Image: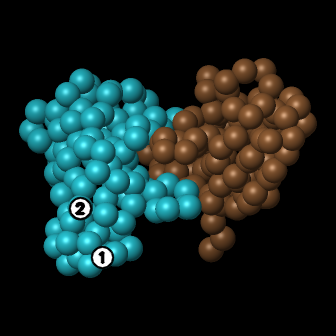
């Protein structure tokens, strides 16, 4: 798996956009970038994934740089329920293989 | 619909005992995963099943850990001669399987405490 680097923690004001960065400078051409989050005392939850184009779904947007060495997860209007640990993952095998979680970014939404 | 369920939600045992943790995946999901999460860490992969067979068991820490999925649905993670270091939350996930990417759906986990 490509090594990913995330800041250990971030704060964001409620209602503002939360921008979570991830560096994956060793990512190879066929490795996707996945984002999961884990709310306290729950199992991780899938958010979004992408290869090289920007992606958007009902939860978030994913912006991947042209060189694919970094990406940003954007929660457009953060709510208190978005407080969680966010994991950026770039597994070697596309599809149904193991996910290698790091320590992620602990995002705290401030009321 | 029903998500991934895990039982028990909490298990306290004594060092040296045997424990079984159960995972009921989402109906129709052929892929099933076990992870372990220690306090303050991200989940750590243990084993992956595609159908009834273990496709990747490279994350099992030692031979005290074993998992089965005899009918391709429910899975049981078995830990023999438990040690205090086995204390963690054990997470199960399932996905549709196949060759395309399918997100993994996680259960709430079983918190194992070895005294």
Q: CA distance from mark 1 to mark 2?
A: 12 Å
The image quarter in which residue A64 lies: top left
| Residue A55 higher or lower than A82, as above or below | above
Figure colour of chain A: cyan
Counting from the top left corner in percent of width and height, residue A48 is at 34, 55
The residue shown at (55%, 36%) is: B44
Mark 2 sits on what residue?
A11
Counting from the top left corner in percent of width and height, residue A82 is at 35, 68
Color encoding of the figure: by chain
In the picture, measured across the screen, residue B79 lies left or right of residue A64, that is right
The residue shown at (50%, 62%) is: A40
Residue lying furthest front in this view? B115
Figure colour of chain B: brown
Q: Quadrant of the N terminus of chain B?
A: bottom right
Residue at disc 1, secondary structure:
loop
* Residue B68 appears in the figure: no
Closer mark to the observer between disc 1 and disc 2: 2
Nearest the eye: A15 or B113:
B113
| Residue B112 higher or lower than B26, as above or below | above
The residue shown at (18%, 58%) is: A19
Nearest the eye: A81 or A57:
A81
Mark nearer the N terminus (1 vs 2) = 2
The image quarter in which residue A101 lies: top left
In the picture, measured across the screen, residue B8 lies left or right of residue A94, that is right
Mark 1 sits on what residue?
A79
The chain that hosts pointer 2 is: A
| Residue B27 higher or lower than B80, as above or below | below
In the picture, measured across the screen, residue B98 lies left or right of residue A21, that is right
Nearest the eye: A13 or A98:
A13
């Amino acid at each position: 798996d490509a090594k990913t680097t995330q800041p250990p923690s971030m704060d964001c004001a409620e209602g503002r956009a939360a921008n979570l960065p991830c560096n994956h400078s060793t990512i190879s051409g066929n490795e996707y970038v996945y984002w999961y989050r884990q709310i306290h005392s729950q199992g991780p939850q899938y958010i979004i994934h992408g290869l090289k184009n920007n992606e958007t779904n009902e939860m978030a947007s994913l912006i991947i740089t042209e060189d694919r060495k970094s990406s940003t997860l954007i929660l457009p209007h953060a709510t208190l329920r978005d407080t969680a640990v966010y994991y950026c993952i770039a597994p070697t095998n596309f599809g149904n293989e193991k996910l290698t979680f790091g320590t992620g970014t602990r995002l705290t939404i401030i009321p | 619909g029903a998500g991934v369920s895990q039982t028990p939600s909490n298990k306290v045992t004594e060092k040296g005992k045997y424990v079984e943790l159960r995972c009921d995946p989402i109906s129709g999901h052929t892929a099933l995963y076990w992870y372990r999460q220690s306090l303050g860490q991200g989940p750590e992969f243990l084993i992956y099943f595609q159908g009834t067979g273990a496709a990747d068991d490279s994350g099992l820490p030692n031979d005290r850990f074993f998992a089965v999925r005899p009918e391709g649905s429910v899975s049981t993670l078995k830990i023999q001669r438990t040690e205090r270091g086995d204390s963690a939350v054990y997470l199960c996930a399932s996905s549709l399987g196949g060759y395309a990417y399918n997100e993994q759906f996680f259960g709430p986990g079983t918190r194992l405490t070895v005294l």
